[in-house]
Amino acid sequence: MVVFLLVILVAMVLGIVGAVAHGLFYLLLIGCVLVVADLVYGVVRLRRPRQRLR
């Protein structure tokens, strides 16, 4: 869960810097790709059946 939130935070920072700074539009794109990849990771992790601890 920590990795999920950390990647979301990094994506937000990259998106803000990419939107504000002139000529750094690629950072905004990287931030968007990170958000999509993180959401896919989260969905896969939630759908995967968890093993029961004995």
Image (cartoon, rainbow, N blue to C red):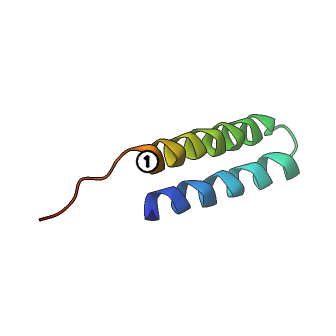
Camera-nearest residue between 27 and 21: 27
Image point (61%, 42%), residue name: 34
Q: Is residue 4 left or right of residue 24?
A: left
Percent coordinates x, y for residue 18 in the rendering? 79, 46
Percent coordinates x, y for residue 14 in the rendering? 69, 50
Amino acid of disc 1: Arg
The residue at which mark 1 appears reads as: 45
Camera-nearest residue between 22 and 5: 5
Residue 22 vs 26, above or below: the answer is below
How many numbered discs sit on the rendered protein?
1
Q: In this view, does 33 lie to the left or right of 18?
A: left
Image point (17%, 63%), residue name: 53
Image point (70%, 56%), residue name: 12
Q: How crowded is mark 1: few (under 14 residues within 10 Å), some or many (20 or more)?
A: few
Percent coordinates x, y for residue 54 in the rendering? 11, 65
Please identify the quadrant where the N terminus is shown: bottom left
Question: In which image quadrant can residue 5 be found?
Answer: bottom right
Q: In this view, does 51 lie to the left or right of 45?
A: left
Question: In which image quadrant can residue 16 be found?
Answer: bottom right
Percent coordinates x, y for residue 13 in the rendering? 69, 57
- Name the secondary structure under disc 1: helix
Residue 26 vs 11, above or below: the answer is above
Residue 53 vs 19, above or below: the answer is below
Camera-nearest residue between 4 and 25: 4
Camera-nearest residue between 6 and 1: 1
